[in-house]
Amino acid sequence: MAKSQQELNPSFNSEVIAVPGGEHLNSCFACGACSGVCPVSQAIPEFDPRRIIHMIRMGMKERLLSSDLLWYCSGCRSCVFVCPQDVRFADIMGALAKLALKEGYVSAQDLVEKGKAAQVRRDECVACLTCVRVCPWEIPKIDQSGVAVIDVEACRACGICVEECPAQAITLNESEDERLLAACGA
């Protein structure tokens, strides 16, 4: 079935390129090396980096930004080492995530629920600064009320703060891609 013109947004490629992380999109010449090495695409065939780049170029904005595929990239950067054009697919996925947030396809709370960001249970936080010290990206901060807060949009969902919090005040839901990868035995 052919896509209708209404479903395609020809400026989507330019929108992605304008977001930090998306600037290398047009360097891709669709060789497929990224798809061949991607551990997520091996376990979840619907997640295919080359196909996602093709969807961007085709202008399939709404379909892509509303899709759970957007949140499956683990950010492992295996694709960077095999890409002859230095496309940095994980950065493109980050740009897509920023667009999805900015345009309301997903909310900060959706990211927490999808397991793509950690969250502090404020009533359990003892403001010990452990999360602030252990986060390699300096994302947790102590707010004016003396309680840790995590910028959900910046969080990498690595789980370090969750594991290190002595009060167990930080939670991170299991993401759908982690669940699918575990089910596949990957």
Image (cartoon, rainbow, N blue to C red):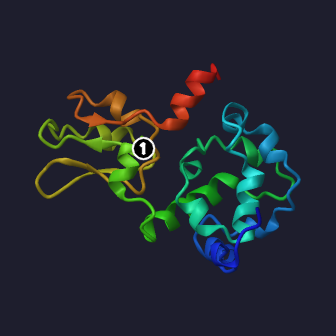
Q: Is residue 132 left or right of residue 148?
A: right
Visible residue check, residue 151: no
| Among the 4 quarters of the image, the one containing residue 123 | top left
Measuring from the top left, give residue 173's x and y in whole percent.
Answer: 38, 35
Please name the residue that numbered disc 1 is placed on.
Answer: 114
Measuring from the top left, give residue 63's x and y in whole percent.
Answer: 60, 62
Visible residue check, residue 69: yes
Does residue 4 sit above or below 156 in this rendering? Answer: below
Q: What residue sits 10% from the left and 54% below the top?
A: 145
Q: Tell which residue pokes out farthest to the top in this image.
A: 185
Residue type pointed to by label 1: Lys
| Among the 4 quarters of the image, the one containing residue 163 | top left
Helix, strand or loop status at disc 1: loop
Does residue 52 sit above or below 4 in this rendering? Answer: above
Q: What residue sits 82% from the left and 40% below the top?
A: 36
Q: Residues within 10 Å of mark 1 (few under 14, many from 20)?
A: some
